[in-house]
Image (cartoon, helix red, strand yellow):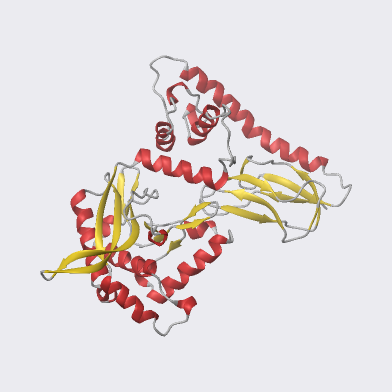
Amino acid sequence: MATEVNMPKLGLSMKEGTVGKWLKNEGDAVKKGEALLEVMTDKIANKLDAPADGILLKIVANKKAKLPVGGLLGVIGSAGEDIGELLKRAAAVKAAPAAKQAETKVVAKAAAAQPGARVKISPAARALAEANGIDYTVLAGTGPEGRIVREDIEQAIASQSAAVDERAAIESIPYEGMRQAIGENMASSWAAAPKVTHHIGVDLTNLQSLRATINADVKDNEKVSVTDLLVKAVARALETHPRINSTLSGDEIRVLKDINIGVAIAIPDGLVVPVVRNANHKNLTDVSREIKDFAKRARKNKLETEEMAGGTFTVTNLGGYGSVEYFTPIINPPEAAILGVGRTVEKPVVVAGQIAVRPIMGLSFAFDHRLIDGAPAAEFLATLIKLIEQPYRIFIQ
């Protein structure tokens, strides 16, 4: 009996996914649990395993196809098995919403053709259009009552980029999947949030000393990192300044109860931000182990979508590259702020009236000015600096 391969629900908020690439061809033998294809969401690429043994009889959704959760991706069965009826049923289910969408487009085009007509567009679609120079007033929306939605803008961007650049290139990298998701999310954030960035150098002497003490009798694979300590320091500072731990929801600024710190991790195909949940309530050892586990599984593409959801603040550390001191990190929506960490450099500073050479780490704190004003942001940063320069404060109430 044939087995359907359907679009999985990879997260509570997931409504659709995009086919990345098939790892098997039609006619190939597959085994249950064997990687069959890649499915992309707006946060991560997931490898989907075969649900049964058999032959991949039919690939229904090809690369770049977008399907709702439960949509038919392909069919596994026995050699020569008749799957005609199964494909007909799938086609009928797909045709119903397609017909409705076509009808909506006709109505939307008529509305768009009326000079002076009010353009209905979602906030996310508007931000993406403005970030990419798309004139949305001439587009036909496919949303309810002709509303222009994000997918309409994405299609317009794709059409705008369709012209082939004939210049010589040493490599052509498809702008799709995770790379495209990162690009669109960052463009949307940059366009929507009026951001301000505070830059400051912080003395790392005492934090480095504390770290050395903690790691003195610890195995190499259990040593805590500067990032681990910074995550704890940020969580502590957010307890003191809860308004920084907020999000904009419609016409409300919601100050969030949970302090969930996202930690940006670079991987070969892009960037992922797994979340340390309730970081303020976890001890340093648990935070360190969790971040190490995230990093290990991120490089193997084994993170779950839910592990990258629900963040309230992000820390992104470029210090290890040794080339960046200060930068402008892009806020990870729907969060209100992000901390960028630069390299640590030995610099002469004045300490108790005397010149001394100290390790100074660059911090870049970017925040959404719709939610956070400059003074509260400066107060948060002052608290964070005190916690870093007097790190014993991180662990006392």
Is 279 left or right of 202, judged from the image as shown?
A: right
Q: Look at 79% across and 46% down and name the residue there.
A: 26
Relative to 119, residue 326 above or below: below
Q: Look at 47% across and 16% down and name the residue there.
A: 113
* Residue furthest out toward the left: 353
Q: Look at 50% across and 24% down and name the residue there.
A: 140
Query: Horizontal and vertical percent for residue 130?
Result: 40, 31
- Quick check: can you spot residue 369? yes
* Residue furthest out toward the top: 115
- Quick check: can you spot residue 303? no
Q: Quadrant of residue 339?
A: bottom left
Q: Quadrant of residue 84?
A: top right
Is 298 left or right of 208, judged from the image as shown?
A: right
Is 316 left or right of 356, judged from the image as shown?
A: right
* Residue furthest out toward the bottom: 217
Query: Horizontal and vertical percent for residue 182?
Result: 48, 46
Q: Look at 36% across and 54% down and name the residue there.
A: 324
Closest to the observer, 86 or 158: 158
Number of numbered callouts drawn = 0
Relative to 388, residue 90 above or below: above
